[in-house]
Amino acid sequence: SAVISQKPSRDICQRGTSLTIQCQVDSQVTMMFWYRQQPGQSLTLIATANQGSEATYESGFVIDKFPISRPNLTFSTLTVSNMSPEDSSIYLCSVGGGFTDTQYFGPGTRLTVL
Amino acid sequence: AQSVTQLGSHVSVSEGALVLLRCNYSSSVPPYLFWYVQYPNQGLQLLLKYTSAATLVKGINGFEAEFKKSETSFHLTKPSAHMSDAAEYFCAVSVPRTGRRALTFGSGTRLQVQP
């Protein structure tokens, strides 16, 4: 299984600012995913990030709000732009691959927007 | 489109009792199914997965799940609950044949284990 780290692990931010979350994997992976988990709720896919192509966003999520970079096969960033309190969530990256499509998750970034 | 329904947002059992967490899926093509566990303030850990091989799947920590196509179910069970099993459990589905490799999650079930 892949070992995934995220930075920062948590942050408290002011309304209107932006935060960039980093996701680092210990092996090369084709597909990376970014999920959001709002307080007390399940996980919702934000976007799929493949190296060398534009991220694919799910309905309700737009690139201007959640720009994603995927510069190589072991790293990705998600930026939460122009934050509001409604963006307070845990943001998780995951990687998938192989025949069984098992996905492994990072520890998450806990974001609080004041 | 695929979806997952978890029946019961909260389940409470006594230590040593049977654990049963329910998951039903909807998919137009054969799905892959997963159970993940999330302990407080932690990320998600894979418990077990079904990928069209054996219908009874054994996972970590004594958990198992049975894929029942006729019932479109993938319920998670453990014969004897332990205090350390208290956590949030998520059922998830993917349908790689459609090109969608991301996971669709159920709403989650919080398991409480009473002493």
Image (spheres, rainbow, N blue to C red):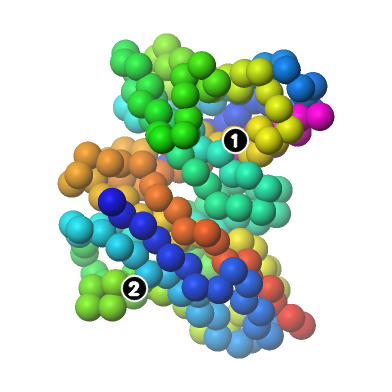
Q: Which mark is residue A91?
A: 1
Name the amino acid, label 2: Ser
Q: In the rendered view of the protein, which quadrant contains the N terminus of chain A?
A: top left
Q: Position of residue B65 (x, y in %)?
A: 39, 72
- Answer above or below: position of A12 versus B96: above
Q: Who is closer to the viewer here, A47 or B46? A: A47
Relative placement, left or right, of A22 versus B3 is right
Name the amino acid, label 1: Tyr
Q: Position of residue B27 (x, y in %)?
A: 26, 59
The residue sitting at 42% across, 70% down in the picture is B23
Query: Can residue B50 be seen in the rendering of this structure?
Result: no
Query: Can residue B10 be seen in the rendering of this structure?
Result: yes
Q: Position of residue A63 (x, y in %)?
A: 47, 19
The reply to whether label 1 and label 2 mark residues of one chain is: no
Relative placement, left or right, of B13 versus A55 is right
| Residue highlighted by disc 2 | B73
Count of number-bearing discs: 2
Q: Who is closer to the viewer here, A39 or B91? A: A39
Q: Quadrant of residue A16?
A: top right
- Gap between marks 1 and 2 measured at Cα: 29 Å
- Asked which secondary structure carries label 2, the reply is strand
Which chain does the residue under circle 2 lie in?
B
The secondary structure that most of the magenta stretch takes on is strand
- Asked which secondary structure carries label 1, the reply is strand
Q: Write down the region rendered in magenta.
A: A107-114
The residue sitting at 49% across, 43% down in the picture is A44
